[in-house]
Image (cartoon, rainbow, N blue to C red):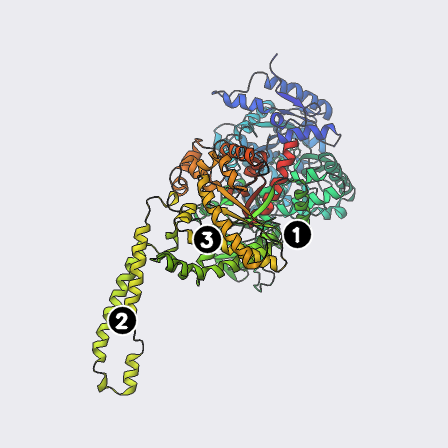
């Protein structure tokens, strides 16, 4: 006996999506919980892989036999015969892999029709219009999907007949028009394939099954998997579902529709979707006619509407997740044809999570886990400033929320090309098709002039979290002339437009945007996350303003405050430069004396904002030449200054005759005069700087004189910073503000370095305590960003009360990659050819860098059991890296403000996933 390749819907395991594909597994599951699904069966993904493996592309042995046997069962259940002249059975042949890839693979409807069965269909229904309508659809889909006939060839004929008949919509075509179309379509196929259209239903079926299998390796599907990083472990091969046809195109008591159990754009708990009366399959999503919102069905087909609401309830109760489903009503009977978990944007995910917990459908744990932390990014998207006074030029449907600005581009290829150059692009189309997918990736947003909220454009944009306005019917798009007309204005390719997917409004030009606000639901979710998480989430913030923002995002403290940014202010940099170019220690101390109050004030403000949360301040880290101009810049400036000096000298000669001039003449000459001596002073200063820049030149600055190395060479700098921190602390304490400062030393590689700095700290502490008459409490700790520091973590732990992994530097050091060079020169190639799976500067390399971290944590805690350990590199905001940080027992992660919510959710996931 051959392997089992085929499962009837009554027997397939609804949990086994890898074997049956998502669509197939759910068809089985729905059948088994007694929802009204037409009978059918699934051919497994294993059959697909075996088929694709065979160089001669034959179906594996046993497949067609099992198909026959299962088809017999379907015939029995429906009382129809496949290929029968009376009561013919028609089927759909549908793709479906483990991960849904909407629109990427192909489906054929009404299979089993030929001139004989067509008559049977017509006799059985007494409806010849319907018969020919089904037939023309079949020839077209089969021709396109199974025989590779270009779609335009059918479209041209279809339009020709519509024009001849003088009608706008397919439903207005008469039976004889449809007959004409069928004849033309058959000719199209014959002309293109040089063979008559296959008439044997079993032959049709076999060709169709192979075509669906082949579509797994089609360009569209491959691109999609690459873009969404769908690996073979997640989905390998497509299943084929063979399903008895039910007909939504049998008249006005028939319909077809798609819907979500809740609104996938807002999360609101109402059925969301659209339907079309007297239509079949793809009609709703293809934008053939503009579909009606599902609410209209309450009047039009009230009984079926109630059944639909009942179906909606059952689906959610069973799957405990918002469902995206397809249904057809055939002469008043409702059938469910597909369901899957609904793809929602972050707003909807968050809202439904909260509401589904409130009604007891799911628990908090499930509510948190169903939100991918990275999705929260969308909520931090800007939206249009509600105060803007711009007038919209058109209104379409709010198909995917959020606002986007970009230049209008009318085709996907151009959008891709321009997007690659960094241009912000809005893809503008009449309607989109699966072939346009690459244009979506490249665009900020999508605008279509046709199609509903379940049109292709809307569904795909929502899946990607990109703003979309669909069906903006006021806009006429001419893709050939690359212009769109709206009323009496128009916009061309390259013109800036703004779309608002939340309201459906379209604007010419750029409309101001504002930052997103936290919804109460998001606050709820994040508070649940905080209850569960063990890791604390801190923010990297360098200024009081940053700190305010970090608090808004829910930071539990500041994990990294970089003091260098504070020196870059306009009034500060000159003092910093003065300090750097100082020839003597005295001069340097004088300059530092001016910086001290400034820095103390910064710290004080940050402490006040964050009180009583901890604030970790890192002493100066970058090489000091970063505060000076470049050598070339100085050389050029000096040259110009010298020229200027000569000009001024020349003018002085001229004014030696000033005693011949009258007063106003002299005044006008003197005005704009500069003293050449003054220019000389400037030149001298610049020359000192130049000398300094040359002296400071390093072959490899990232590995050079920076961090604690610099601190130890010029103790005055760190002493000033330490004093600023401690005095700010003292002042806050005096003002009754609770502060928890932490002083962190960068670039440490030996305990001796820490020891020296610590001595200064203790000394300054004494002096500050004395001056202010109070006792200071703070922590002293070390960055771990040098490999040696990790290896000596136990020794460092004798000096340091906390560690913070600087994984940017640590990654560079562990790989011996300099980031810029790596990312510009060879990392993309490494990733493409799978030498390295990810960019280690984005995704923490747990196998190498992570292993080092794990050891360092262990060694550090051997000496100091309660050692606080965190991470403050960019990785601190990356969900997968956060999960790893949790695993190795870190106490906190620190990341940029806007990533704090993502990190909070990821920290909760880390705990929840551990328990599974
Ligand atoms: P996709 O994965 O692209 O959604 P489907 O396999 O779901 O493709 O089918 C395309 C369309 O045809 C859908 O609207 C679906 O509801 C409809 N359809 C599929 N099978 C049948 C059937 N047996 N009877 C009626 N309509 C069907
Ligand atoms: Mg479908
Ligand atoms: Mg660093």
State how far apart marks 1 and 2 are (Cα). Answer: 63 Å
Give the label on residue 519, or none. 1
Image quadrant holding the C terminus, namely: top right
Q: Residues within 10 Å of mark 3 (few under 14, many from 20)?
A: many
Q: For the residues carrying marks 3 and 1, which lies nearer the camera in this image?
A: 3
> Which residue is identified by label 2?
676
Residue 263: tell me if it is visible.
no
The quadrant in which residue 312 appears is: top right
Q: CA distance from mark 3 to mark 2?
A: 40 Å
Where is residue 673 drawn, in percent x and y? 29, 75
Location of residue 408 in the rendering, given as x and y in whole percent from the top left corner: 49, 53
Local crowd at mark 2 within 10 Å, few (<14), some, or many (≥20)? some
Q: Quick check: 571 left or right of 229?
A: left
Task: Determine contact: label 3, label 2, CB under 8 Å.
Answer: no
| On screen, residue 475 above or below 153 | below
Q: Where residue 407 appears, x then y in whole percent?
A: 48, 54
Report whether 376 appears left or right of 149: right
Spot occupied by residue 436 in the image (x, y as percentages of width and height): 51, 42
Compare marks 3 and 1 and give the one earlier in the sequence: 1
- Cα separation, mark 3 vs mark 1, equals 45 Å
Q: Quadrant of residue 689?
A: bottom left
- Circle on res. 719: 3
Q: Is residue 191 above or below residue 655?
A: above
* Pointer 1 or 2: first along the chain: 1
**Which tag, 3 or 2, sits closer to the chain's start?**
2
- Where 235 sits versus 629, above or below? above
Depth check, mark 3 against mark 2: the one in front is: 3
């Amino acid at each position: 006996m051959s392997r089992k390749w085929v499962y009837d819907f009554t027997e397939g395991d609804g949990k086994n999506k890898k074997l049956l594909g998502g669509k197939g597994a759910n068809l089985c599951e729905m059948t088994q919980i007694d929802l009204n699904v037409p009978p059918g069966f699934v051919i497994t993904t294993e059959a697909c892989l075996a088929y694709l493996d065979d160089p001669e592309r034959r179906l594996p042995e046993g497949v067609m036999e099992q198909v026959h046997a299962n088809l017999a069962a379907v015939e029995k259940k429906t009382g129809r015969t496949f290929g029968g002249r009376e009561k013919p059975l028609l089927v759909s042949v549908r793709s479906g892999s483990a991960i849904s890839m909407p629109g990427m693979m192909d489906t054929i409807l009404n299979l089993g029709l030929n001139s004989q069965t067509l008559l049977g269909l017509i006799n059985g229904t007494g409806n010849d219009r319907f018969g020919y309508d089904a037939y023309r659809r079949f020839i077209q889909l089969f021709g396109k999907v199974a025989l590779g006939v270009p779609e335009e060839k059918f479209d041209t004929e279809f339009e020709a007949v519509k024009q001849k008949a003088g009608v706008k919509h397919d439903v207005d075509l008469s039976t004889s028009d449809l007959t004409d179309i069928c004849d033309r379509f058959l000719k199209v196929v014959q002309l293109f394939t040089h063979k008559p259209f296959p008439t044997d239903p079993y032959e049709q079926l076999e060709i169709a099954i192979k075509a669906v299998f082949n579509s797994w390796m089609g360009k569209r599907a491959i691109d999609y998997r690459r873009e969404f990083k769908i690996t073979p472990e997640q989905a390998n091969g497509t299943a084929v579902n063979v399903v008895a046809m039910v007909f939504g195109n049998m008249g006005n008591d028939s319909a077809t529709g798609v819907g979500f159990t809740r609104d996938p754009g807002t999360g609101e708990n109402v059925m969301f979707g659209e339907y079309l009366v007297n239509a079949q399959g793809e009609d709703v999503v293809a934008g053939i006619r503009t579909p009606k919102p599902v609410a209209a069905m309450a009047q039009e087909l009230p009984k079926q509407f109630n059944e639909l609401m009942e179906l909606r309830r059952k689906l959610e109760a069973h799957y405990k997740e918002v469902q995206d489903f397809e249904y057809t009503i055939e002469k008043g009977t409702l059938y469910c044809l597909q369901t899957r978990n609904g793809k929602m944007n972050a707003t909807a995910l968050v809202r439904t999570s909260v509401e589904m917990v409130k009604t007891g459908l799911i628990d908090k744990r499930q509510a948190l886990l169903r939100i991918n932390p990275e999705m929260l990014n969308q909520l931090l998207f800007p939206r249009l400033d509600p105060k803007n006074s711009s007038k919209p030029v058109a209104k379409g449907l709010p198909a995917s929320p959020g606002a986007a600005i970009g230049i209008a581009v009318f085709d996907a290829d151009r959008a891709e090309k321009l997007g690659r150059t960094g241009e912000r692009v809005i893809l503008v189309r009449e309607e989109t098709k699966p072939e346009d997918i690459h244009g979506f990736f490249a665009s900020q947003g999508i605008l279509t002039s046709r199609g509903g909220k379940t049109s292709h454009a809307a569904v795909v944009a929502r899946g990607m979290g990109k703003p979309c306005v669909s069906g903006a019917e006021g806009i006429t798009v001419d893709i050939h002339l690359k212009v769109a007309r709206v009323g009496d204005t128009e916009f061309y390719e390259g013109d800036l437009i703004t779309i608002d997917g939340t309201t459906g409004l379209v604007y010419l030009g750029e409309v101001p945007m504002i930052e997103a606000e936290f919804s109460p639901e998001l606050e709820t979710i994040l508070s649940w996350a905080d209850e569960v998480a063990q890791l604390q989430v801190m923010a990297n913030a360098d200024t009081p303003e940053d700190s305010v923002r970090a608090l808004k995002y829910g930071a539990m403290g500041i994990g990294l405050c970089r003091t260098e940014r504070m020196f870059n202010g306009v009034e500060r940099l000159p003092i910093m430069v003065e300090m750097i170019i100082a020839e003597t220690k005295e001069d340097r101390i004088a300059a530092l004396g001016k910086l001290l109050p400034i820095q103390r004030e910064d710290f004080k403000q940050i402490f006040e904002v964050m009180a009583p949360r901890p604030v970790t301040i890192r002493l100066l880290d970058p090489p000091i030449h970063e505060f000076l101009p470049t050598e070339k810049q100085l050389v050029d400036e000096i040259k110009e200054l010298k020229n200027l000096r000569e000009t001024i000298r020349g003018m002085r000669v001229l004014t030696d005759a000033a005693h011949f001039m009258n007063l106003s003449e002299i005044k006008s000459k003197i005005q704009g005069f500069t003293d050449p001596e003054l220019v000389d002073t400037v030149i001298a200063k610049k020359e000192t700087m130049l000398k300094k820049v040359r002296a400071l030149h390093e072959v490899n600055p990232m590995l050079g004189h920076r961090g604690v190395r610099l601190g130890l060479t010029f103790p005055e700098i760190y002493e000033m910073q330490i004093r600023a921190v401690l005095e700010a602390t003292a002042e806050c304490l005096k003002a009754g503000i609770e502060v928890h400062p932490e002083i962190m030393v960068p670039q440490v590689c030996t305990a001796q370095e820490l020891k020296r700095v610590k001595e200064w700290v203790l000394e300054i502490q004494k002096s500050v305590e004395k001056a202010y008459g109070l006792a200071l409490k703070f922590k002293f700790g070390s960055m771990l960003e040098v490999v040696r520091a990790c290896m000596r973590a136990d020794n460092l732990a004798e000096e340091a009360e906390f560690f913070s992994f600087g994984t940017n530097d640590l990654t560079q050091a562990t790989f011996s990659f300099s980031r810029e060079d790596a990312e510009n020169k060879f990392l993309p190639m490494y990733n493409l050819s799978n030498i390295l799976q990810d960019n280690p500067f984005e995704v923490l390399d747990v196998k190498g860098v992570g292993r080092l971290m794990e050891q360092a944590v262990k060694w550090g805690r051997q000496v100091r059991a309660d050692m606080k350990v965190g991470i403050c590199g960019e990785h601190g905001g990356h969900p997968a890296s956060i999960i790893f940080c949790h695993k190795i027992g870190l106490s906190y992660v620190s990341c940029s403000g806007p990533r704090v919510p993502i990190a909070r959710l990821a920290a909760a996931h880390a705990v929840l996933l551990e328990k599974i």
